[in-house]
Amino acid sequence: MNDLLPKAATLGAAFIARNETLAVSETSAGGLVSAALLSIPGASAYFLGGAVIYTATARSSLLGIDDDAMTGLRSASEGYARLLARTVRVRHGATWGLAETGAAGPSGNRYGDAAGHTCLAVSGPVELFATIETGSADRVADMRAFAGRLLDLLGEALAEMG
């Protein structure tokens, strides 16, 4: 987690300076993004909430995304990451929503994605999406990589806003 803390500190300072807020939806990062952002003193000024949406039950009960909203989507896809990011942003009334959905390993998922696959989304005044493949089956390393890349993507979105 130590590699995530400098990124989170930079982002936290930016959110405080900009008076903006965020909410987070994670799957295979397992809460590392939220933990990093919450480790920064003053996080209550910008962090509105987050959840690990690891199952369909969690998706439905915590974000209110039902089977109809999932029509044509599958987990661990950019479309699903977009839906998660937009939904967590709207449900929390945040400026920004973040989402990560993937397969940390040691094996892939039931959709045919290999371990080390994740899709990321940032939804707010700017929307950015990315798919990464680490090529690794190391669960912990992948979780850290996924969290780090999502924080980087958020930084890129903030930079676009100026």
Image (cartoon, rainbow, N blue to C red):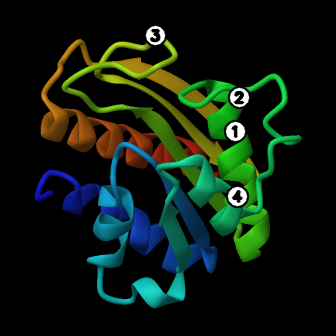
Q: Residues within 10 Å of mark 3 (few under 14, many from 20)?
A: few
For the point 66% across and 48% down, the residue is: 84
Give the quadrant of residue 81. top right
Kind of residue at disc 3? Gly
| In the image, residue 157 above or below residue 90 | above
Pair 4/1: label in front:
4
Q: Secondary structure at mark 2?
A: helix
Whether tag 1 and tag 3 are in contact, CB under 8 A, the answer is no
Q: Is residue 20 left or right of residue 55?
A: right
Q: Is residue 83 left or right of residue 119?
A: right
Pair 1/3: label in front:
3
Whether tag 2 and tag 1 are in contact, CB under 8 A, the answer is yes
Kind of residue at disc 2? Gly
Q: Which residue is mark 4?
A: 60
For the point 19% across and 25% down, the residue is: 106
For the point 41% across and 71% down, the residue is: 12
Q: Which residue is mark 3?
A: 112
Kind of residue at disc 4? Ser
Kind of residue at disc 1? Arg
Whether tag 3 and tag 2 are in contact, CB under 8 A, the answer is no
| In the image, residue 141 above or below residue 31 | above
For this orientation, the residue located farthest to the right is: 68
Q: Would you say residue 79 is visible in this rendering?
A: yes
